[in-house]
Image (cartoon, grey):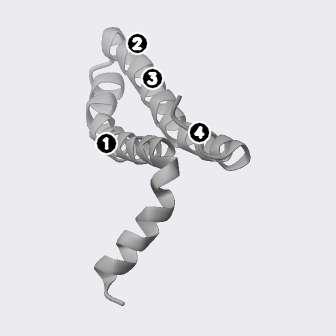
Amino acid sequence: MTNTALNLRLLSHVKPYWRVFLFSILGMTVVAATEPALPALTKPLIEGTFIKKDPVVMCWFLMVIVALFVAIDEAQKRPHYIVLHATFDGPREAD
């Protein structure tokens, strides 16, 4: 069996759960997009708070970092809850 045939066969089992699969992929995409933002914000945060001691930068970066952590946390949690819900309730039939 080729890799393509195997992947298509596995995807046929996922077909009833396409919404869950879509939300899981979307969540992983959001996590992948937000993870590099933390190191990118580190340099301006250090320069603005410790070197220049700018109070505006201190306040804004604190809010940005908290919002970023909330976004990462939600993007990591939501797909797990959706998959867990779909596992116990089964696939939904179209009305």
Identity, as a three-letter code, of the amino acid under mark 2: Cys
Whether pointer 2 and pointer 3 mark residues with C-beta atoms closer than 8 Å, the reply is: no
Of the pair 78 and 2, the residue shown nearer to us: 2
Q: Is residue 93 left or right of residue 47?
A: right
Residue under the image location 43 percent in, 17 percent down:
63
Disc 4 on helix, strand or loop? Answer: loop
Q: CA distance from mark 1 to mark 3?
A: 14 Å
In the displayed structure, would residue 54 be above or below residue 89?
Answer: above
Q: Which mark is residue 33?
A: 1
Amino acid type of the residue that numbered disc 4 sits on in the rendered structure: Arg
> Does dot 3 land on a helix, a strand or a loop?
helix
- Give the spatial CA distance, label 2 vs label 3: 13 Å
> Which quarter of the picture shows residue 43?
top left
Q: Residue at x 56, y 37 (%)?
A: 78
In this rendered view, identify the residue nearer to me: 41 or 75. 75
Tell me: 86 left or right of 57. right
Residue drawn at the location 36% of the way across and 14% of the way down: 60
- Residue hosting label 2: 59
**Residue position marked by numbered label 4 in the rendering:** 92
Q: Position of residue 33 (x, y in %)?
A: 31, 42
Q: In the rendered view, would you say 38 is above or below 44?
A: below
Give the labeled residue for mark 3.
67
In this view, the mark in front (2 or 1): 1
Work out whether mark 1 precedes mark 3 in sequence or the reverse, and give the earlier one. Answer: 1
Q: CA distance from mark 4 to mark 3?
A: 33 Å
Q: Nearer the viewer, mark 4 or mark 1?
A: 4
Question: Local crowd at mark 3 within 10 Å, few (<14), some, or many (≥20)?
Answer: few
Q: Could you say where residue 64 lies in the image, as x and y percent from the top left?
A: 38, 22
